[in-house]
Amino acid sequence: MFEGPAVFVDIETNGGSGPRGRITEIAILRIEGGEITEEYTTLVNPGTPIPYWITKLTGISDGDVADAPYFDDIAYELHRLMDGAIFVAHNVRFDYSFIKRQLEACGYVFNPKLFCTVRMSRALYAEHRGHSLQKIIDRHGIDTKSRHRAYDDAKAMFEFARIAIAEKGVESFQANVAMQLKTKTLPSHVNEKMIADLPNTPGIYIFEDEKGAPLYIGKSVDIRKRVLSHFANDTKIVKEMKMAQSCHNVSYIQTETEIEALLLESAKIKELQPLHNRLLRRATKQTVLVREFDDNGYMQMALESRDLNESTDIAGIYGVYTNRTKAKARLESLTKTFDLCPKLMGLENGTGACFRHQLGMCKGACAGKESIDAYNRRVEYALERSKIEDWPFKGELAVKISETKALIVNQWIIKGYMTAVEDGSTYVERIKNGFDIDTYKILRSYMRQHRSNIELLPIAS
């Protein structure tokens, strides 16, 4: 079956993820020479209550595990049984992640070779659609007494491996073993050839679920290397594990340069709204901090809800936030740090001096006791980092990003692309676009970092 020993492993858990995820049952079948040489199975006390829906699925209740050993009590025996063996499981990286994390917490190093029976089924039985353990059991007539119990599921996996060898041949089975050992970080639903075909060039990649819906969009100067790094971290990072478990396909769009990948990533996240890209997802309207002046000339701030994509006047915007709560929290922090007036900052209503002035925490701009220039300069300094910078050029410019390509930019808005053609001419592609806060940040950072070697070319309207 395998050149050396292997262990067929199955676990049941409390349904938690990350540090909250605990094993409630484990079964190990150690295989040598194609035969079972040792068996081990036990309930495990997770140290936390088992949710009702988990009990309904597995039949394992708090009462069942009350007198069971804790994982620490059986760690030595588990490590002994699995030491030096290929780790086999159905959707292997799930079971492996739980056991690895809990063994390492007990001081054991655990980095076995991995073999997944889901990936084996997809490779050797590609004519079938479903590859869950239940569908495999039904399809091949494997006898089991208790589904979703560790020992019966581990035994079913072992029987499936024997059936696969008998039906598909030893060579096909061993070829799949060799392939999996080379690509052990891949999730069970991801095809090896698809990953091998990913380019080592700049661009964006899109993780998709079984129905083709986007799960996550990322960018990199090396698409293939970055995608593989996600899967390599899925046993350590909860977010990576959730994405890996749901991922069935990885699509991509190549770009010539890294900045194009950054800009495309931002645009695609807003367009497709993938589940795991919360930071760059944006609602149609955002909360913006707008500068105004009172009758005496003191700067004051107001919060407005705007669609910046349709905004033409961005010079007076001093901050962009996803919601009003975050905007107010930021204003409160700046007001305390720089001794600003909460009334002028839009945090306090009423007539006369603000309440903090009475406590000595406001220098009295609200009562006309601080000079207008001094107060306004302090507000400008406090909001310097969040303020949308005035466009520092006159009119439209071409920002060179490679030897052959430039972005046409005006007021921090990408208006098109310029591409040098082999005959010496220039091809210009115009696009309809509006202001986007993430594009603004990317462009501003790029232009600052490349100030010494960037070429800025004025363009006729």
Image (cartoon, rainbow, N blue to C red):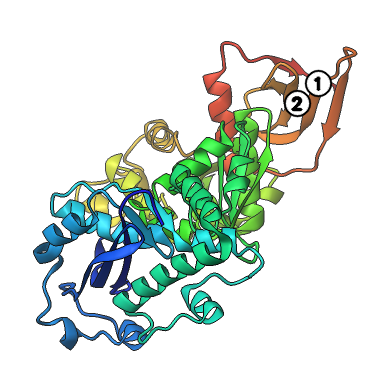
Residue at horizontal 56 percent and vertical 40 percent from the top: 219
Residue at horizontal 41 percent and vertical 35 percent from the top: 372
Q: Point out which mark residue 340 bears.
A: none
Q: Could you tell me which quadrant the C terminus lies in?
A: top right
Image side of residue 408 versus residue 99, left or right? right
Question: Quick one: 290 or 41, which is closer to the camera?
Answer: 41
Q: Amino acid at mark 2?
A: Glu
Question: Quick one: 253 or 3, which is closer to the camera?
Answer: 3
Residue at horizontal 33 percent and vertical 37 percent from the top: 370
Q: Residues within 10 Å of mark 1 (few under 14, many from 20)?
A: few
Residue occupied by mark 1? 459
From this viewpoint, is residue 246 visible? no
Residue at horizontal 12 percent and vertical 58 percent from the top: 76
Can you tell which quarter of the image residue 384 is in?
Answer: top left
Q: Does the CB distance between marks 2 and 1 fall below 8 Å?
A: yes
Residue 451: % across, % down: 57, 16
Can you tell which quarter of the image residue 158 is in?
Answer: bottom left
Image side of residue 377 versus residue 289, left or right? left
Question: Quick one: 22 or 164, which is closer to the camera?
Answer: 164
From this viewpoint, is residue 421 visible? yes
Tell me the SS state at disc 1: loop
Above or below, 346 against 428 in this view is: below
Q: How far is the residue under mark 2 from the one under mark 1?
A: 6 Å
Residue 210: % across, % down: 60, 65
Tell me the SS state at disc 2: loop
Residue occupied by mark 2? 396
Q: Residues within 10 Å of mark 2 (few under 14, many from 20)?
A: many
Image side of residue 249 versus residue 59, left or right? right
Q: Amino acid at mark 1?
A: Ile
Can you tell which quarter of the image residue 145 is in?
Answer: bottom left
Mark 2 or mark 1, earlier in chain: 2
Residue 268: % across, % down: 65, 49
